Amino acid sequence: MSSAGYTAMAGGTGLWEKLKRWVPIFVITPSIIASFVYVFVFAGWTLYISLSDSTLLPTYGFKGLENYFSLWANRRWGVAYSNLFFFSTFYVLAAMAVGLVLALLLDQKIRAESFWRTMYMYPLAVSFIVTGTVWQWLYNPTGGIQFLVNSLGWTDFQFALTSDRKNAIWAIILTGIWQSAGFTMALFLAGLRSVDGDIIKAASIDGASTFRIYRKVILPSITPIFLAVAVVQLQAAIKTFDLAVALTNSGPGISTTFPATYVYDLMFQRGQIGEGAAAAMMILAALAVVLVPYSLYLAWRRRRESGRG
Amino acid sequence: MKFTTKVAAAATTMLAAALLSSTAMAAPKVLMLHQWASGNDAASIAKLGEMFTAAGGTWEQTAIAGHTANTLAKLRADVVAGNAPAAVQLKGPEIAEWNATGGTADMDELATSEGWDKVVAPELLPVMKPDGKWVAAPMNIHRINWIWGNKAAMEGVGVTELPKTWADFNAACEKAIAGGKICLAHLSADWTDATTFEVVVYGQDPELFKKAFVDGDVDALRSDGMIKAFDQMRLMVSKYMDPAIAGRDYDTASNMMVNGDALFFIMGDWELGTIKSVGKEPGKDILCGQAPTDWGKPGFILNSDSVVFFKQSNPDYVEGQKLLAHLILSPDFQKVFNIAKGSIPARMDIDLAASGFNACQIQSQADLKASIEDGELVRSMAHNMTVLQKYRGAMMDTITEFVNTPEMSSADAANAMADAVEAQM
Amino acid sequence: MAEATLNSSGVVDHEASVASRRRLISRIVIYGLLSGFALIYLIPLCVVVFNSFRTLPEISAHGLIAFPQSFRLDAWPQAWSDFCIGGQCEGIQRYFWNSVAMVVPATIISTALGAINGYVLSKWKFPGSDIVFGMMLLGVFMPGQIALLPWAFILGKIGLANSVYGLILVHCIQGLSFTTLFCRNYFVGIPDDLVKAARIDGAGFWRIFYKIILPISPPILIVTVIWQFTGIWNEYLFGVVLNSGANQPITSALVALSLNGTTVRTYDVMSAAVLIGALPPLLVYFFGGKYFVRGLTQGAIK
């Protein structure tokens, strides 16, 4: 990409011209500083605190890796980490599947598309407090879905996800899908709309069926979108906090503890800022596991594309 | 209530004027951080605000709802930002912890002049003055070990009085089951599971309670006595409660007992406020009694809400802290606040019967006095009055996990609890 | 565009009736599926709307999911101006306006900054500009719990602790990553020749921005505004912790209503309050929604 970069600019003569050349740099500098502080200073501070003896307040006595050892010795952290894997798997896959189905349906030249789209996307506009409150009502066995079905005559019907230790995480997964499938749908739809119309035309002239065109032509050409959506969803899953707090507050028992909720609990409820920071670093590590390969892939793809010209 | 508030306000105005005469220039101001954002709690704290304003102060509050972590996050953020709030609702060992950071204000001058040491319940003194100086003002005393019973429902299955011992309790529950009722209403959350469990431990063996939950002794946590308490807890969870305890909200659980679907509810005295708010008369339709004990004496698990003061540089806020502390410990506030909240005053010199408290609260005060004499009074672990949050968190994690995990054995639970506490040491 | 060609593919004259029947069936299936999903999506909304019209005794008798048997609007004014939160019985209105006062400037500033940053990073590249972009991008992934105490410290140092300005600053900086990402990716698609030609004509940095870039950016600016507005409006943790007293945002009032530990739940008022609290971002979505997919096509996905 040959941009009209500032290095390529013709050199001016006057002082004013020289200054003007620096305008873009001046303009972006505050943002660079702010982002640097936000990303690196904050993360670096957290790293240091995770190695410190901080308890009630941040303090700076060095303690080595002790916080990490005590974190990994903690049962609840084990629960949190295994929940994260379980949740991520189903939440990411199912939200993508639902989003893709919706996007494909909307792509069928339907009437009032924007009406349908808005319907599937409105949960995105709603805060976790609202979602949590309402879904709690639905899951509530003495007033929600179970009560409704029971009062319709099916008295044995049981639907009490949030009160069942083994299944409470499904309540979070289902609600998470409800809230985010609209977003994956929008991303997929955006991808479908960006596919080159000529390729499709060529395929349909060859007599391929709609199904076949999707399977052989359109979907393969948006593989990068699949990957992008997966990464977006996965990082959201790793940061899951609001939904878990609002729906089950880590319960029943400690069964729906997530890394982020545990970080919050350690840092703010229990006054173990050092160990909380260690847990936070583990979240960052998990994010890195997802993001580093992805950005390497992106870089590789970009190079390959520019190599082809 | 309105009238008493006004009288109180008038009285405190005069007192405040006397207090303020020394530093006449300062206009008392306070910003109080607390977590009583709704319902009775909020109404009670609003009374404090009214009194403060009536006494000539400028009252501001930050009420943060939900999880205590949010309030504590706010406090930490404020301290880190270098402007600690003038007054914060904090309790138990946290007072000592924050005191150790050096940020708390010294209220000794006021305490001496008003003689707090003589009137405040002795069990609260070490909590309010962690290293000998007053840094906090107690607002009330909650009793945790109450059992509430629906009279009609009890009579319906042939239970004539509230159970005195755990054997009585189990017998009453068998009758309830035979009569097709739920015995014990409950909602499963870490604090409610821990509340019920600590009541069981205390009822079986108060010495074990002190060793395990007050001193955080790992061997006591692992002991046979603890296993026995878990056995009783398992029996209650699996048989005497209904299966839908998790995810239930507080008022639903309370209503199960109030409406007679369940016989009993083991819960602290804030339940009084809930009972009254649905129009029932505590002591008449709903019986209150000491939760079962196997050792035949009055017992008391104590919880106390208090306000901690943080050092301020602005003289207006220093004055405000003095005025607020004075108001909190004034008999008028202690009455108004506690009548609404269900608890009893932190001052021992208030005649409850003459001040409009109900029968349950009067019994609470009598039992408090008796248990102090017998040396059976303990502070509540579940309500954060004993061990540090990190130990309490570890204990509560295990207890609530036990409640929600049918296949977890009592011995495993006791071991897991001891291990979890040990891991935090 | 995909859909323009797909559905005309099967049309062959002599089998027109078979084809049109197949087409009808596939239409029925498509609309059936769409309606099924729509139902699932709408149920929670309907439940809240209905409950805001029902009386409390009715809710406790018939459960939380039911058609209203009575219709009354009492809960709405009660939620707005009467209900007691934190001992003050003035409803959620103050919290609502606090949020408005925070979200409007924060959205405008962060969107403007994102547009300028995106413009620099796409059209005025400098050595290391890709690294700068990469760094800004990392901000997207920062978990909020990590940033809480550092923010408190910084705001305390610069004297903005416990004020709405402090929160605006925090939201602007945290939003930079998103707004810059959206705008940069969108602007990359604008042909460089356009910018080059303008510069040959003597137009400077700002002139090109106003005359060339801005006129074609509404789609992405709308996406950015929607993103920022809903994100900031719905944020709870920072709004509560970095603010105090009378300045608390709407989310704190909603939490106070919905998580009231030991008291009786007023489902009717809660429903009305929840709806009022969700209304502004919902409106933003309804009016801006049609640009969202378009903006994403051109912006976010690249």
Image (cartoon, helix red, strand yellow):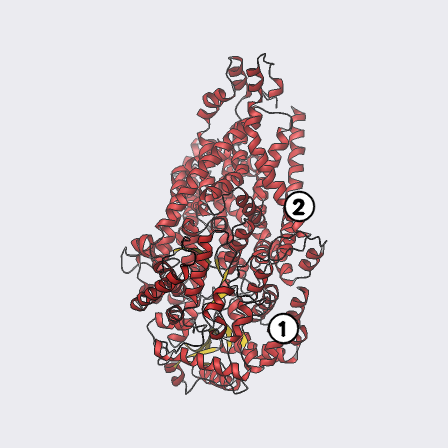
Tell me the crowding category of disc 1: few under 14, some 14 to 19, or many 20 or more residues within 10 angstroms, Cα based: few
Look at 53% across and 65% down and name the residue there.
A252
Residue A224 seen in the current view? no
Q: Which mark is residue C243?
A: none
CA distance separating discs 2 and 1 = 43 Å
Give how far across and how far down residue C217 sits, in percent: 46, 28
Query: Is label 2 in contact with label 1 (beta carbons under 8 Å)?
Result: no
Q: Mark 1: which amino acid? A: Asp
Frontmost residue, B181 versus A238: A238
Secondary structure under badge 1?
loop
Q: Is residue C58 visible?
A: yes
The chain containing the residue under callout 2 comes to A
Please give the name of the residue rendered at 33% of the width and 52% of the height, measured from the top-left corner: C80
Q: Is residue B175 above or below residue A119?
A: below
Helix, strand or loop under label 2: helix
Of B378 and B157, nearer the camera is: B378
Q: Which mark is residue B215?
A: 1
- B126 on left or right of A289: left
Q: Looking at the rendering, in which quadrant would you find the N terminus of chain B? A: bottom left
Indicate left or right for B343 with A167 as reference.
left
Q: Which residue is mark 2?
A: A289
**Vertically, is A13 above or below C232?**
above
Q: Residue furthest front?
A: B22
The image quadrant that residue A29 belongs to is: top right
**Three-letter code for the amino acid on which mark 2 is drawn:** Val
Tell me residue A132's x, y (percent): 46, 55
Which quadrant of the figure has residue B92?
Answer: bottom right
Along the horizontal axis of the image, is A252 left or right of B410?
left
Chain letter of the residue carrying label 1: B
Q: Which quarter of the rendered picture does the C terminus of chain B lie within? A: bottom right
